[in-house]
Image (cartoon, rainbow, N blue to C red):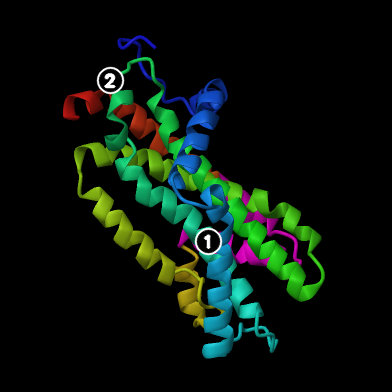
Amino acid sequence: MNINQPLSINPSQIVTSFIKNRQLIWQLTKRDVIGRYKGSVLGLAWSFFNPLIMLVIYTFVFSIVFKARWNTGSDSKTEFALVLFIGMIVHGLLAECINRAPTIIITNVSYVKKVVFPLEILPWVTMGATIFHTLVSFLVWSLFFILVNHSFNWTALFLPLILLPLILFTMGFAWLLASLGVFLRDISQITGVFTTILLFISPVFYPISMLPEKYQIILYVNPLTFIIEQSRDVLMWGKLPNWQGLGIAMLISLIVAWAGFAWFQKTRRGFADVL
């Protein structure tokens, strides 16, 4: 890329850049995942044991200690833990990317100096590593669900379609925050607080039906609410996705993704001056 060439903000450039640099994204993502466990005895196996340990803890604390039950009329001791874990996994997908986004450029200064390096792929690398851990977590959830229920809902096949809008929505904010993090270093502190607040104003620990109807409408403004509810529908209850809602979510996510990408492309020329 010539430094004097204008950087495209055309929405198609998101796809073009991803396809063109897919091998580089794959290699950097693999390095990110392996590097996280470098030096540990179990290595990559921790990506499996971490969610497994968390699921066991959730099951014990909420089912045995608090005797919590989801609002379904079921007395199952493990149902609450399984439902809760879905919410935690979906929230974690967004939270990990958002929390890491403000430092993506700062921690890769060497790439900024290389005018031929496609900086816009760095958020994809973070997303790739996050998706890997999300898939492992869902694998642990699936094994636990089969162990408890001796069956599996075929509607789980729709989960990738449900998560796609969330992935695109998160990428939009990742590009935005990656850029802002270069110029405003306090952003990384704010995102941690924001994702924590988001955890409690999302239907992770409680079903949305427990709230008064007027608050349910407000809660649906939260981008995580629809995705969490739909994920539970296809995984836990064997229901088909809400196709109309999914279409609206996809449209909004595409707009957010493009807006974040456009901001990143417009501001990236100033990265080298600041760093």
Near-viewer residue (203 or 154): 154
Image position of 81 (left or right of 158): left
Q: Tell me where residue 242 sits by quadrant.
A: bottom right
Residue drawn at the location 50% of the way across and 52% of the way down: 41
Q: Tell me where residue 118 sits by quadrant.
A: top left
Q: Magenta segment: does it hold 60?
A: no
Q: Tell me where residue 74 sits by quadrant.
A: bottom right
Residue drawn at the location 27% of the way across and 50% of the way down: 188
Secondary structure at numbered mark 2:
loop
Q: Position of residue 239 (x, y in %)?
A: 75, 65
Region of the chain picked out in magenta, as a range: 222-250
Near-viewer residue (266 or 20): 20
Q: Is residue 236 visible?
A: no
Q: Position of residue 162 (x, y in %)?
A: 63, 53
For mark 1, what is the residue? 50
Residue drawn at the location 36% of the way across and 65% of the way down: 196
Q: Residues within 10 Å of mark 1 (few under 14, many from 20)?
A: some
Residue drawn at the location 28% of the way across and 20% of the way down: 113
Q: Is residue 119 visible?
A: yes
The mark tally for this picture is 2
Q: Position of residue 36 (x, y in %)?
A: 44, 46
For mark 2, what is the residue? 113
